[in-house]
Image (cartoon, rainbow, N blue to C red):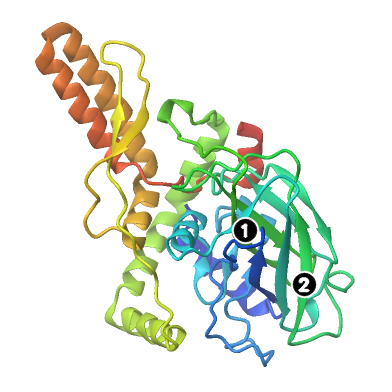
Amino acid sequence: MPSFASLLSTAALVALAQGHAVFLNAQGETGSPASRGFQVSLDIARNCTSINPCQQDTTIIRDNEIKNNVVNECGRTELTGNIDIGENTENALAAKQVTQVKAGSKVSVTVHQVNADGAGPYTCDLIEAGNNGVISQNLTVLDNIPGVNGFSQARTQQFNITVVMPQNFSCSGSSAGNVCTVRCRNNALAGPFGGCFPVQQTDTAAKVNTAAGVDTNISTEAVLKQVKDDQADFPAAVAANQQAGSREGLAAAKKVDDILNANGATLVSLAAPTQTVSVLLGGNPAAVPTATATPAVGGGAGAGRGGNNNNNGGQGRGQQGGNNGQGRGQQGGNNGQGRGQQAGNAGARNAGPSRRRHLSQAEMRGAY
């Protein structure tokens, strides 16, 4: 998880990022809804070039920040910091703002160039699992934005680029089980600047994930490095969290929300379903979620964020509880089996819809 401490330590770098472009719209198959760049606000002015407010929702995507666990693969904005891919994807699905694609689809992307170093050329790649940190393949970009090394004389101008989906890919991310993340960025030294947006694949069956089927072959070295980094960051992260939750911090955040929602743009919240995972008691589990049960009360965006935070722990508790319960069931009969089912299901309920990033892009590539 990108830490508050790391974000605070790069505050000076944020001030130096004085270019930018914003991904306003991404249209895939005809008749499908359009996507928008993660964390892009329709209420921020597009007729100016100043750092504040005109550049506040542009996305900065730097490999070193990803490697050092400051941000996820989609980077950050100056206004809201790290972009949580899983949360933004679920919000887009709830708002019906995820464009649809299939093999070979051409996605028309509208990019607003704020000032000089929001120019082209842009390159794009694909995270087929949505937010697992693995860049699976590069994408073809047609009709690129004019520019060299991310520079041109254009300002407050919109361009359309075309991103071509590959012939062979398989989207498996999000609660829908068929959403990919497309990431694009230029090569400006003050950036790179760019954006991410979700696409929903329609020519493949949606994936139903199981805990046992998730590839988690992470190296010991990578795990130990993450523990060391998190321990070093923890004190400052706690202080930053306390400051954000202070009266002054909450008041400042509310003022920003009020401005960004001035035109009535509000987050769409949907109750997440509660699923029951079927397991084979006394044998190897076939943990496939079954029919929807009672919808969770008070779901939506808040539940999504909680799920992200607790995903790994919830899966672990579900597996351990299920296995322990099976063992008791073999020794103690039906009562033990019942306990195993309950413990396994409790763990499954704690599992969030998306994995939260803990390792660098390079480490994740090597692990998967």
Distance from disc 1 to disc 2, alpha carbons, whole Å, reads 28 Å
Q: Residues within 10 Å of mark 2 (few under 14, many from 20)?
A: some
Q: Is 245 or 340 nearer to us in this picture?
A: 340
Instruction: Residue at 78% x, 67% y: name it.
Output: 161
Q: Which mark is residue 359?
A: none
Considering the numbered disc 1 on the image, is that residue within a helix, a strand or a loop? helix
x, y (%) of residue 262?
43, 89
Instruction: Tell me what residue is drawn at x 78 percent, y 76 percent.
Output: 159
> Is 100 on the left-hand or right-hand side of 193?
left
**Mark 2 — residue?**
160
Task: Identify whether 101 is placed above or below 62.
Answer: above
Q: Name the residue: 63% across, 69% down.
A: 59
12 relative position to 284: left or right: right
Relative to residue 30, is residue 222 depicted above or below?
above
Q: Nearer the viewer, residue 264 or 359?
A: 264
Image quarter of residue 318: top left
Q: Position of residue 143 (x, y in %)?
A: 85, 66
Q: Which residue is mark 1?
A: 65
**In this view, the mark in front (1 or 2):** 2
Looking at marks 1 and 2 on the same chain, the residue that comes earlier in the sequence is marked by 1
Which residue type does callout 1 highlight?
Answer: Glu
Point out residue 282 in the picture as x, y percentages from the top left corner.
26, 11
Q: Amino acid at mark 2?
A: Asn
Around disc 1, counting alpha carbons within 10 Å, would you say few (fewer than 14), some (14 to 19), or many (20 or more)?
many
**Quadrant location of the C terminus?**
top right
Instruction: Name the quadrant containing residue 255.
Output: bottom left
Near-viewer residue (189 or 201): 201
Position of 189 with respect to 352 (left or right) is: right
Residue 256 versus residue 145 in the image, above or below: below
Helix, strand or loop for disc 2: strand
| Residue extending farthest front | 31
